[in-house]
Image (cartoon, coloured by chain):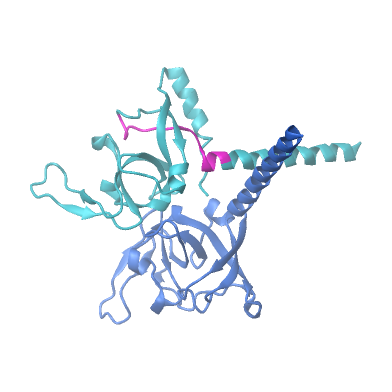
Chain colours: A blue, B cyan
Amino acid sequence: MLRGVLGKTFRLVGYTIQYGCIAHCAFEYVGGVVMCSGPSMEPTIQNSDVVFAENLSRHFYGIQRGDIVIAKSPSDPKSNICKRVIGLEGDKILTNSPSDFFKSHSYVPTGHVWLEGDNLQNSTDSRYYGPIPYGLIRGRIFFKIWPLSDIGFLRDSPNGHRFSDD
Amino acid sequence: MLRGVLGKTFRLVGYTIQYGCIAHCAFEYVGGVVMCSGPSMEPTIQNSDVVFAENLSRHFYGIQRGDIVIAKSPSDPKSNICKRVIGLEGDKILTNSPSDFFKSHSYVPTGHVWLEGDNLQNSTDSRYYGPIPYGLIRGRIFFKVMQQTGMIWGYASAQWSSSSIFQTEE
């Protein structure tokens, strides 16, 4: 009787671990659903929008300029940030405010990316903490599923290009 | 006949995916065996030493000063680095060379760590590329399994490590 119950418990635990690992790998290597919060990507992504993120581009190093990515925050490893890739390694980035008289620029170091939110007035991004290592990127957002009034693939940046093309 | 073969193939693929995922999660969340190459951690870890790395400390944010960690390289996301944690966020780090007359120091920013190799003369670390975000850390090395014992074994290990057991992080 007891052996039957123990046997069933072990089988249940075994199946849970098994399917838990498979689900984890699916979210890790393929993609999943994410809810974004905060105003830094308005109007492209509003607060509490639900989006699809795919993780294949990151593993195949296919992230490009203009992609919206999810990354671990460089100042808080427990939270994630959601910004647009403005520059890849080697790109020249304009770093001055629009009110400055003289333009200043810097180059993105190897292995790093420069992120900015679409809502430039209300976004803490690479203009504040500098370029972040590519290794912090976790996935690429490519499709919005909620709210239904705004469903579809995501738009290009409303801010135009802020880097000098090579 | 064909249906039997197809059925067996699907079952085989299914089992492979299943156990592959379980093995991946085990290496990802518990730990695994790693081979380190390079001279930057001598004499603690020699070139081609085999060590155990555990990944639990990273997930529970239990990395401490003095731990040897494996992290993604900040200048090359495809490779890993193996250094010792010298400072955590908020710590004051001496950044001048011993030959400088005036001492200079800086503070480690929030969410970052300062890494240095044990072989200070021959190590590219935070003294070169600055503090790295905690999020790049992948695991903590705590046990040396095997020291390089000879040329033939060393060479075989180097080949094996190119398809290393240590998986990409979550």
Q: Is residue A36 left or right of residue B141?
A: right
B116 or A76: nearer the viewer = A76
Q: Front-most of B78 and A54?
A: A54
Q: Residue B157: image x %, image y %?
A: 48, 26
The image shows residue B19 at horizontal and vertical percentages of 66, 38
Q: Is residue A60 visible?
A: no
Extreme left residue here?
A: B101
Please give the range of residues in magenta.
Answer: B26-42
- Residue A41 lies left or right of residue A21; in this view the side is left
Identify the image quadrant of residue A12: top right
Quarter of the figure with residue B42: top left
> Is residue A38 rendered to the left or right of residue B87?
right
Specify the quadrant that holds the N terminus of chain B.
Answer: top right
Name the residue furthest front.
A1
Residue visible at 63% across and 46% down in the picture: A21
Residue A89 is situated, as x and y percent measured from the top left of the image, at 40, 58
Residue depicted at 32% across the width and 71% down the height? A95
Q: Is residue A124 above or below residue B154?
A: below
> Residue A82 at x, y = what percent?
48, 66
Up/down of B10 relative to A52, above or below: above
- Say whether residue B27 is magenta: yes
Against B167, is A67 above or below? below
